Amino acid sequence: MSFINRRINFSPPDISSSEIDLVCETLKSGWITTGPRTKLFEKKIAKYCKTNRAVCLNSATSCIELCLKLFDIGPGDEVITSAYTYTATCSPIVHIGAAPVLVDTAKGSFEMDMNALEKAITPKTKAIIPVDIAGRLCDYEQIFNIVKSKENKFLPKNKNQEALGRILVLADGAHSFGAKSLISGAKSGSIADFTAFSFHAVKNLTTGEGGALTWRGIKGLDDDEIYGDLMLMSLHGQTRDALSKTKLSSWEYDVKILGNKCNMTDVLASIGVAQLERYPKLLKKRREIIEYYCDELKSENIGFICHFDSKSESSGHLYCVRLIGKNEHFRNSVIEEMARENIVTNVHYKPLPMLTAYKNLGFNINDFPNAFETYESEITLPLYSTLKMQDAERVAKTLKRCVS
């Protein structure tokens, strides 16, 4: 197939012989469920993020849900998040019985409107879940300032909430593994109170399916106790996992709570361990593509997320552009035209109030005009570490031709 006609996929995984070899080694080891590889991956993630501990689970969704449970958030409580995100951010709120409170984005932005966020806080608010869309860090300094200003309204219900003394800030970092603040030097994973990462197949660093939860040290809360509670919740509430039961005379166990089943396996962790060794090079390639796109598209009537500036450095997960002044019909026609050119694009995201499940919860997109305005003109271009620069050139040139 010629270069002109070759299909450009949206986001295939970057899997090398390193991942394949380590997975084969794990398969031959006789231990394929949660075990030494998973524990190793947790340690490497904690070291990378500069946190004391990390917990690996089967998805970022599980990470969010278990974190909310860790703070006993549930019926009668409210959790605030963005209307402009994927359902995985919000569905755990519903799963635990709390009430989701959606906030519109700022005009022309992918991030929550901070004034609207502040107004949404009530005495029932127990957590805020900001979303690092495309890999760019949210303005956590402003979020923490808002949370601090509302401390007098916070009503703790248990010891973990009392130790925190305010609303929990739980970052949806599904896109932001590797992002960092250039002001503090802190990486995603150590900026919010807790951060949930995704290692899904399309993410920068993948384990096929999987996720990790990291956290900052919280005075009054013991890291080992947090880790133990999360492990308990992730394995049916059983006091011993399969690995610990292999020790002599260690079969005995108890089930202390009716927990979830959302652990990561050693097979998946092996992919992650190998990916993490290669990760700096993967991020570097993504940055090269982003900088090319920005340079090539800057003179057009196209807006895009600023991945790199003086304040922060993105993980470069998605290249989201907005076709300024265009509507949903025009955007969809561009997607169709690029598909005819054998270029696969996407949309991130359809705001939650547009989806049936959230309509059934009483949300109406008319209450979120900024989120809809961003959505109707948004298109996401191919961006991945195996994308050839000549293909990136073809993507940019085709987009310009389609929108002209």
Image: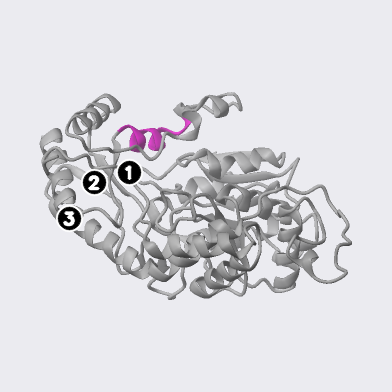
Residue at 70% across, 46% down: 124
Is disc 2 placed on a helix, strand or loop? Answer: strand
Q: Which mark is residue 389?
A: 3
Is disc 3 placed on a helix, strand or loop? Answer: helix
- CA separation, marks 1 and 3? 29 Å
Query: Are there few (<14), some (14-19), or many (20+) residues within 10 Å of tag 2?
Result: some
User: Is the residue under label 2 in contact with that under label 1 (CB below 8 Å)?
Assistant: yes
Q: Earlier in the sequence, mark 1 or mark 2?
A: 1
Is disc 1 placed on a helix, strand or loop? Answer: loop
Number of the front mark, 1 or 2 = 2
Query: Are there few (<14), some (14-19), or many (20+) residues within 10 Å of tag 3?
Result: few
Does 299 sit above or below residue 367?
below
Number of the front mark, 3 or 2 = 3
Q: Residue furthest front?
A: 28
Per the picture, the main secondary structure of the magenta-coloured stretch is helix
Q: Is residue 372 magenta?
A: yes
Does 317 sit above or below residue 185?
above
- CA separation, marks 1 and 2? 9 Å
Q: Is residue 51 magenta?
A: no
Instruction: Please state the horizontal and vertical placement of residue 71, each as a whole percent of the image.
Output: 73, 56
Q: Earlier in the sequence, mark 3 or mark 2?
A: 2
Q: Earlier in the sequence, mark 1 or mark 3?
A: 1
* Pointer 2 residue: 303
Instruction: Please state the horizontal and vertical placement of residue 254, each as a whole percent of the image.
Output: 88, 57
* Pointer 1 residue: 108
Who is closer to the viewer here, 380 or 8?
Answer: 8
Q: Which residues are magenta?
A: 367-376
Instruction: Please state the horizontal and vertical placement of residue 315, each as a whole percent of the image.
Output: 37, 61
From the viewer's perspective, tell me whether residue 341 is left or right of residue 379.
left
